[in-house]
């Protein structure tokens, strides 16, 4: 079972060091370093179970991926929904395993079996002397084209944004207009710039040093003049 680092920190759960390799889709492996022990229960506390969660940075993205329109969905008022905001795109903070999941279900639930459309499923938890330190987690999520494009532009937008880029966008937004079947925008000149230091005295000193060299070496002076004349 998994829980997110965010929710474990907000609840102040005591972490225990644990190194557990977890395999996922496409054979990808991740080493989990921390776990917590806690209890999960329903609102009236008629169901209470001690569980152990492995801590991960994030279980999955928002689920559902976008808020659903349930205007035309009729849900009987007498039903006590486990998640009253099931239609809203929310974070997933905990993922329980089969040993707890089938305890949560009420109908047709037995110690080791669960009835399905394909037949009875053997499920539950085994008490082993040597517990395998290997976990498997398989999770799928369907992405719409809109989600994929949003993710693409989020990746493209990563990176530090300088003040110059902000100023350029500000100038663009304030000056862009449509004239004579074309868009016109002002050039993004910098609003402020650093002035160069006064280097006149330094340049004058270097010129005097060069002139002294010419006075001691007429040939160098001649070559220098020829080069300058070629440039001019």
Image (spheres, rainbow, N blue to C red):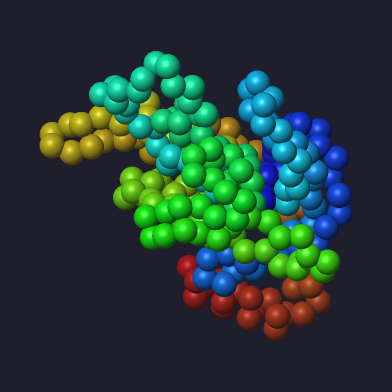
Residue 43 visible to the viewer? yes
Q: Nearer the viewer, residue 141 or 72?
A: 72
Question: Looking at the picture, how far across and down is residue 123, in whole percent?
Answer: 58, 57
Quarter of the figure with residue 193: top right
Q: Closer to the camera, 210 or 143?
A: 143
Residue 31 appears at what percent x and percent y?
73, 64
In-image side of 158 versus 186 (left or right): right
Q: How many marks?
A: 0
Residue 216 placed where, x, y %?
A: 81, 76
The residue most toward the top is 77
Q: Residue at x 48, y 68 (%)?
A: 232
Q: Is 5 located above or below residue 231 in the figure?
A: above
Tell whether 61 sits left or right of 8.
Answer: left
Residue with the most extreme bottom position? 219
- Of residues 14 and 172, the one nearer the viewer is 14
Q: Please tell me which residue is depicted at 42% across the width and 41% down the height of the picture.
A: 65
Q: Is residue 58 visible?
A: no
Q: Against 17, is 168 above or below? A: above
Q: Residue at x 34, y 48 (%)?
A: 144
Compared across the picture, whether 173 is left or right of 112 comes to left
Front position in the image: 95 or 63: 95
Name the residue: 40% across, 37% down.
66
Q: Position of residue 170 (x, y in %)?
A: 44, 30
The image quarter in which residue 136 lies: bottom right
């Amino acid at each position: 079972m998994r829980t997110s680092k965010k929710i474990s920190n907000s609840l102040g759960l005591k972490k225990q060091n644990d190194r557990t390799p977890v395999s996922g889709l496409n054979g990808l492996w991740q080493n989990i370093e921390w776990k917590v022990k806690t209890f999960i229960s329903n609102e009236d506390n008629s169901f209470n179970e001690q569980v152990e969660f492995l801590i991960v940075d994030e279980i999955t993205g928002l689920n559902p991926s976008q808020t659903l329109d349930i205007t035309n969905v009729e849900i009987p008022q007498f039903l006590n929904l486990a998640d009253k905001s099931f239609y809203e795109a929310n974070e997933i903070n905990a993922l329980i395993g089969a040993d707890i999941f089938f305890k949560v279900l009420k109908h047709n639930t037995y110690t080791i079996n669960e009835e399905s459309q394909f037949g009875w499923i053997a499920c539950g938890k085994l008490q082993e002397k040597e517990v395998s330190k290997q976990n498997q987690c398989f999770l799928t999520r369907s992405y719409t084209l809109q989600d994929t494009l949003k993710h693409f532009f989020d990746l493209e937008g990563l990176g530090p944004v300088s003040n110059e880029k902000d100023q350029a966008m500000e100038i663009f937004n304030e000056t862009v207009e449509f004239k004579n079947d074309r868009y016109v925008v002002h050039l993004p000149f910098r609003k402020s710039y650093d002035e160069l230091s006064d280097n006149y005295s330094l340049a004058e000193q270097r010129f005097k040093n060069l002139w002294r060299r010419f006075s001691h070496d007429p040939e160098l002076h001649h070559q220098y003049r020829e080069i300058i004349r070629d440039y001019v």
